[in-house]
Image (spheres, rainbow, N blue to C red):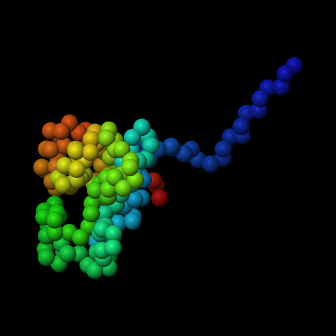
Amino acid sequence: MSASPEKPAASSSPARRRPSWDEYFLQLARQSATRSTCLRRQVGAVLVRDKRILTTGYNGAPRGIGHCLDVGCLRDRIGVPSGERHELCRAIHAEQNAVIQAALHGVAIQGATLYTTVHPCVLCAKILINCGVTEIHYLDGYPDDLSREMLAEAGVVLIREELPSTGG
């Protein structure tokens, strides 16, 4: 008589739900946003292809330049509303930083999917279109109709997501 294999002991912990891939990458984007030095909005981005992380980015001042956390917000000081006059900001956007990281490290991002905490502005949309990003998953909207129009015209798939509550 052959011995039957033992069943693993049942776990006494409550059932745990494993996140989908989209939820996982959006959680990583949210975590990347914690590195942001912007006083107005903390944004994180993750570029992914074939379920593999290519690069991450968050919004903040360029290398060697004082961060808004340290020197204050130029946009607040001169009264620039959200979604306008992007050039009047010390920070590089999270999506831009993710693309820059790919360029610095020789990582091809054509055909990638972007996971980001906020819908990209028109400046980032144009960069993402030209880099060949094919799909964007985002959590929060952004007041930029031209961005949405250009991404749609370029055939980039936009998917607004919601992360499930963690219950804590």
Q: Residue at x 13, y 76 (%)?
A: 78
Q: Residue at x 13, y 62 (%)?
A: 84
Choose between 13 and 57: the one closer to the eye. 57
Give above or below for 48 relative to 85: above
Q: Is residue 163 visible?
A: no
Name the residue furthest right.
Answer: 1
Give above or below for 32 relative to 130: below
Q: Quadrant of the N terminus?
A: top right
Choose between 122 and 109: the one closer to the eye. 109
Q: Residue 103 location in percent, x, y?
A: 34, 52
Left or right placement of residue 6 versus residue 45 in this view? right
Left or right placement of residue 5 versus residue 15 in this view? right
Q: How many marks?
A: 0
Q: Residue 102 location in percent, x, y?
A: 36, 51
Name the image quarter holding residue 58: bottom left
Q: Is residue 8 visible?
A: yes
Q: Residue at x 28, y 80 (%)?
A: 71
Q: Residue 127 location in percent, x, y?
A: 22, 50
Name the residue furthest bottom.
Answer: 71
Q: Residue at x 28, y 42 (%)?
A: 133
